[in-house]
Amino acid sequence: MTWDEPATVDEATAIQTRLRPLADLVSDGPSRVELTAGLDVGYGPGDTVTGAVVVLDSSLRVVDQAVAREKARFPYVPGLFAFREIPPLLTALSRLSVTPDLLVCDGYGVAHPRRFGLACHLGVVTGLPAIGVAKTAFVGTYTQPAADRGSWTPITLDGDTVGRVLRTRDGVKPVYVSQGHRMSLDNACAQVLRLAPEFRLPEPIRLADRLSRA
């Protein structure tokens, strides 16, 4: 699918509304993932955005990475960050020598005011399974999970479950996981735990964050 470039906030929200039904939230997703891409965006002077992608294999070794730096094409509007961040991320993805089996985005999927955050949008545009993993809550209500690794509680919005608050390390702040595209919430959380054996954040986006700021 081609990338739609909005000129106004109204156009951007209309694009999200139009594309939202295309996000596959039913498929369980791959049970075994060989190549996982972590995606993050860094902001620099002059409204510069740097999209970074780091691909890890199943043993969490880096097999490829790419960056793309450009001037932001859309203003800073909460809920519409995808229109600033996806263009450089798509360019970075196009520079990879491998095709990832899963995209792990530093951001939100359906845990979003219009149920169509960065992970949903990027998954629909690329056709790849995608999940969102955020460091802070954005929408919905939840309670804190138990302190042990693997504990979780649901994030609910207007009576629907839109994600989970997931503890990736004992006694450490949780992360906020939501579906993006072609990945169930159960599988998304299982993948996050697999990808976070040592640190709070999954290794692919931890490394992508570092690369975006390098």
Image (cartoon, rainbow, N blue to C red):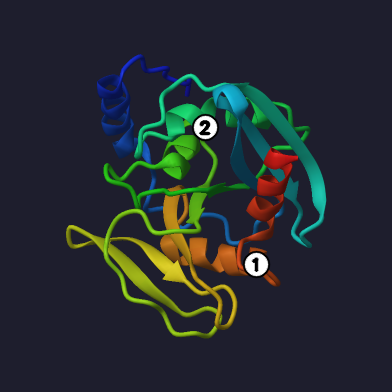
Please give the name of the residue rendered at 32% of the width and 25% of the height, measured from the top-left corner: 12
What type is the residue that disc 1 sits on?
Ala
Identify whether 173 is placed above or below 114.
Answer: below
Q: Position of residue 113 (x, y in %)?
A: 27, 45
Q: Which residue is mark 1?
A: 196
Q: Residue furthest front?
A: 45
Q: Which residue is mark 2?
A: 85
> In screen coordinates, is 104 left or right of 144?
right
The image quadrant that residue 139 belongs to is bottom left
Please give the name of the residue rendered at 53% of the width and 46% of the height, measured from the top-left corner: 129
Of discs 1 and 2, which sits in the foreground?
A: 2
Q: Report the front residue among 150 and 146.
A: 146
The local secondary structure at tag 1 comes to loop
Please give the name of the residue rendered at 33% of the width and 31% of the height, measured from the top-left corner: 19
The local secondary structure at tag 2 comes to helix
Q: CA distance from mark 1 to mark 2?
A: 24 Å
Compare marks 1 and 2 and give the one earlier in the sequence. 2
Q: Position of residue 9 (x, y in %)?
A: 29, 23
